[in-house]
Amino acid sequence: MRQESGMEVDGAEQEQRGSTRRGVLAGVGLIGVAGAVAACGGSDEAGGDDAGSGDPGGAPAAGGTVLAKTSEIPVGGGKIFEGQKVVVTQPTQGEFKAFSTECTHRKCPVDEIRGSEIICPCHGSKFKITDGSKVAGPPPQSGNGTLATRNIKVEGDSISLA
């Protein structure tokens, strides 16, 4: 037996206290590792680059921001505006639609329009330019798998966020 703070402590109790201390330290270490992993966001997500967006926080641009001229959006295709996190499409002549660039699966930003589909590079999700609905890819984390609609305003030959 050993004396600790005026009390006698036998070997079994010392071992039990040592285990508790080790358990607490191990738990703290695991929490630190879990926090670091969560901060990284996973290894299969694409990192967004907001270079040139004018917004270091990466928030969507305020309403009224002119995105493009109508002539810059191809009929049957579209254009991605990374800094504003919006995709503008023109499914048919004179019909303009806008969607969020945030994929419904892992929130990766879509980065390409191929034919009549909006493509996410992370897991191969594909969305229609007509309504943002999913054509292919993994299941959404929430919702119905359709890209969120963004409000735009077409005035004359200018397209801007509403």
Image (cartoon, helix red, strand yellow):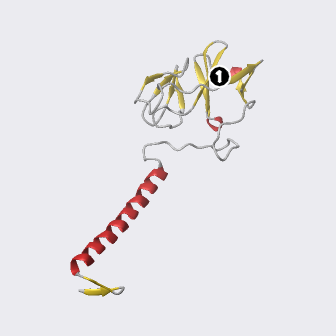
Q: Amino acid at mark 1?
A: Ile
Q: Residue furthest right?
A: 156
Q: Decide: is 58 above or below 88.
A: below
Q: Quadrant of residue 129 in the image?
A: top right
SS for dot 1: loop
- The quadrant in which the N terminus is found is bottom left
Residue 28 drawn at (x, y percent): 40, 64
Viewer-closest of 55 and 3: 3
Q: Quadrant of residue 111 in the image?
A: top right
Residue 138 drawn at (x, y percent): 40, 30
Viewer-closest of 9 and 64: 9
Which residue shows up at 34% across the image and 71% down it? 21
Horizontal side, residue 50 vs residue 145: left or right: right
Q: Quadrant of residue 150 in the image?
A: top right
Viewer-closest of 113 and 27: 27
Which residue shows up at 31% across the image and 69% down it? 20
Which residue shows up at 48% across the image and 28% down it? 143
Q: Which residue is mark 1?
A: 73
- The quadrant in which the C terminus is found is top right
Horizontal side, residue 41 vs residue 72: left or right: left
